[in-house]
């Protein structure tokens, strides 16, 4: 039996294998690179106190220009929406009702705080992260009811603490992704009928460095003795 021992075959075989390895490494390296997406859709569920759990699909449109990121979120079940402008160190959100009328304006000032801030299905952050990173600091939120043209602004100072727990792959309806798992707490006080009431958010979220959005989160909110829970999951993006 004649063996395959002809050296003239070695060079082309080695060359083809080298190309295959280079392509495989390139694909693996580019797989985790950030992708610019124009919108994403989340499926959100929530309940407060004894109310039944409600479900909604929310479409978030994204425009990134220089140092400003704009997100317009449509809540499909009742026509409401919000428009958020995110600057360095500050974010402004406008809330609209189903008629398109402005109902609320909220300014979130996170100043020098460089960690994660949860603000309705997406997060604000100042830099890329690694497992073990941790931040602490205050964030000020000023909210104004526009429906009655009230000049009164509700102000809350939240103490925020964020910690990157791990880097892991998770599966959501939109696919499988590498994510950072982050634990976030935000707590403070606000005035209600001239009484001080406490507010606390406890959130676990999975953030994709590839898409730069939250793929999944679970939240527990306490407003005094009133409790709400919610979850969201990415179902589509483009």
Image: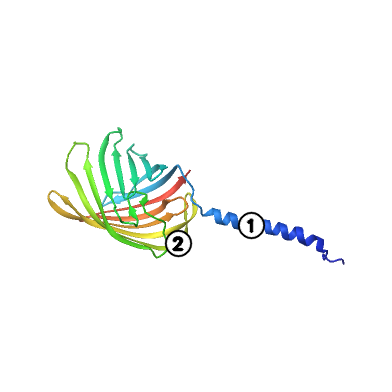
Q: Which mark is residue 167?
A: 2
Task: Check the image and tell me how it is coloured.
Answer: rainbow
- Farthest residue, direction right: 1
Q: Where is 193 relative to 80, above or below? A: below
Q: Position of residue 19 (x, y in %)?
A: 67, 56
Residue 236 location (% of width, % of height): 46, 45
Depth order, front residue of 184/89: 89
Residue 56 vs residue 58, the one in the foreground: 58
- Please give the name of the residue rendered at 37% of the width and 54% of the height, measured from the top-left corner: 126
The residue that label 1 is drawn on is: 22
Q: At x 62% / y 57%, what residue is drawn?
A: 24
Pair 1/2: label in front: 1
Q: Is residue 41 left or right of residue 118?
A: right
Residue 37 picture location, percent across and down: 46, 44
Residue nearest the viewer, comparing 40 with 112: 112
Q: Describe the element under mark 2 as helix, strand or loop.
A: strand
Dot 1 or dot 2, earlier in sequence: 1
Corner quadrant of residue 10: bottom right
Residue 184, given in percent of the width and then of the height, sits at 33, 59
- Spatial CA distance of label 1 from label 2 is 26 Å
């Amino acid at each position: 039996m004649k063996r395959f021992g002809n050296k003239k075959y070695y060079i082309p075989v080695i060359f083809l294998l080298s190309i295959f390895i280079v392509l495989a490494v390139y694909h693996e390296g580019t797989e985790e690179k950030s992708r610019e997406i124009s919108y994403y859709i989340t499926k959100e569920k929530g309940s407060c106190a004894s109310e039944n759990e409600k479900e909604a699909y929310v479409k978030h449109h994204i425009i990134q220009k220089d140092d400003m990121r704009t997100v317009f979120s449509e809540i499909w079940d009742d026509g409401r929406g919000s428009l958020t402008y995110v600057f360095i160190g500050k974010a402004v959100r406008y809330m609209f009702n189903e008629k398109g009328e402005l109902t609320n304006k909220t300014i979130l000032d996170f100043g020098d705080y460089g960690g994660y801030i949860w603000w309705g299905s997406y997060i604000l952050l100042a830099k890329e992260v690694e497992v073990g990173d941790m931040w602490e600091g205050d964030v000020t939120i000023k909210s104004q009811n526009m429906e009655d043209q009230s000049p009164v602004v509700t102000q809350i100072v939240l103490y925020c603490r964020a910690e990157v727990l791990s880097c892991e792959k998770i599966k959501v309806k939109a696919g499988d992704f590498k994510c950072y798992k982050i634990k976030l707490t935000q707590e403070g006080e606000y005035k209600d009928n001239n009484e001080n009431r406490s507010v606390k958010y406890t959130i676990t979220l999975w953030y994709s460095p590839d898409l730069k959005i939250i793929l999944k989160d679970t939240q527990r909110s306490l407003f005094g003795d009133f409790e709400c829970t919610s979850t969201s999951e990415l179902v589509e993006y483009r």
